[in-house]
Amino acid sequence: MPLSPIVLALIRDEIGNDTDFNDASPHIPPQLDSLENIYTDALRGNFSPLVTALICWRRRLFSLQARSMDFTSGGKLLQRSQRIRFIERRIKALEVLADDTHKGSNMVVQTPKDVEVAAEAAEF
């Protein structure tokens, strides 16, 4: 089932138009993951464009960190570290939006009234 153009546009807005993640196509080898496979998998994308984009950014960060560094590249080391920091910030922003942080998934927002009620209940 190919994704609708609207959903693909939402995901592409978040991850950009790089070719490291392909749209669903019969020409893609099965060992390569497509955006459709990530989006429709209940354990990964869970039909959410933000979570799908988060997975794509995490994979980009992993592949960038897995590559070896070339010390003869001159000024490219600064560019590499800037790219890593940009991707890490993007991952952090998407985790907050998708509520995928460790703190965010367990957090309960309390108002001062809730704190007073809890204190009164603890007294009894």
Image: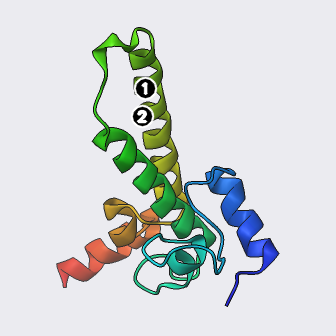
**Amino acid under label 1?**
Arg
Residue 116 sits in quarter: bottom left
Q: Secondary structure at mark 1?
A: helix
Q: Closer to the camera, 28 or 2?
A: 28
What's the mark number on residue 43? none
Q: Going 40% across and 8% down the picture, which residue do you hit?
A: 74
Quarter holding the N terminus is bottom right
Labelled pair 1, 2 in contact (Cβ < 8 Å): yes
Mark 1 or 2, which is nearer the eye?
A: 1
Q: Closer to the camera, 38 or 100?
A: 38
Q: Going 52% across and 45% down the picture, which residue do you hit?
A: 90
Q: Closer to the camera, 95 or 45?
A: 45
Q: Going 66% across and 64% down the picture, which residue do you hit?
A: 11
What residue does disc 2 label?
84
**Amino acid under label 2?**
Ile
Quarter holding the C terminus is bottom left
What residue does disc 1 label?
80
Residue 45 shown left or right of residue 59 in the figure: right
Q: Is residue 74 above or below residue 83?
A: above
Q: Is residue 122 above or below residue 95?
A: below
Q: What kind of colouring is applied to the model shown?
A: rainbow
Q: Is residue 75 above or below residue 3?
A: above
Residue 79 image point, x, y percent:
47, 21
